[in-house]
Image (cartoon, rainbow, N blue to C red):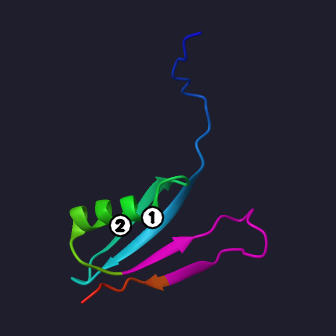
Amino acid sequence: MEQFYNPTTHIDTMKITVNYQSGHRQAFIVPKNMLALDFRKLAEKIGGKIDNIEFSLSNNQVGFYNAEIKEPLFYPE
């Protein structure tokens, strides 16, 4: 049985805001199943060195509403 792309298929996404060391700030909408390392590489390729990343949580996640988690990235020496 062949599988065809169905444009009505829903893909879960999340908003991630990246703050770059240059002071620039960029928002990304990415699939929830995207690996963190793949996202980090993509974000660095687009904007350079990253200062921190903010993950915006959706309203339907238990225990959170309009919340953001801020996680600094640490680079090995």
Residue 65, relative to residue 14: is it above or below?
below
> Residue tagged by mark 2?
40
Question: Element under label 2?
Answer: helix
- Residue located at (37% from left, 58% from top): 38
Q: Quadrant of the C terminus?
A: bottom left
Q: Quadrant of residue 37?
A: bottom left
Rounded to the nearest angstrom, the CA distance separating label 2 from label 1 is 6 Å
Q: Quadrant of residue 24?
A: bottom left
Residue 13, relative to residue 25: is it above or below?
above
Q: Quadrant of the N terminus?
A: top right
Instruction: Determine whether label 2 and label 1 are within 8 Å by CB.
Output: yes
Single out the residue that lies furthest toward the top: 1
Other-residue count near label 1 (Cα within 10 Å), few / some / many at <14 / 14–19 / ≥20: few
Is residue 53 inside the magenta stretch? yes
- Residue located at (54% from left, 11% from top): 2
Q: Could you say which is closer to the camera, residue 37 or residue 72?
A: 37
Task: Please state the extent of the stretch shown in magenta in the rendering.
Answer: 52-70
Is residue 61 inside the magenta stretch? yes
Query: What residue type is disc 2 on?
Result: Arg
Single out the residue that lies furthest toward the bottom: 77
Whole-percent x, y for residue 46 in the image: 23, 62
Query: What residue type is disc 1 on?
Result: Ala
Question: Element under label 1?
Answer: helix
- Residue located at (43% from left, 71% from top): 17
> Residue tagged by mark 1?
36
Residue 72, relative to residue 27: is it above or below?
below
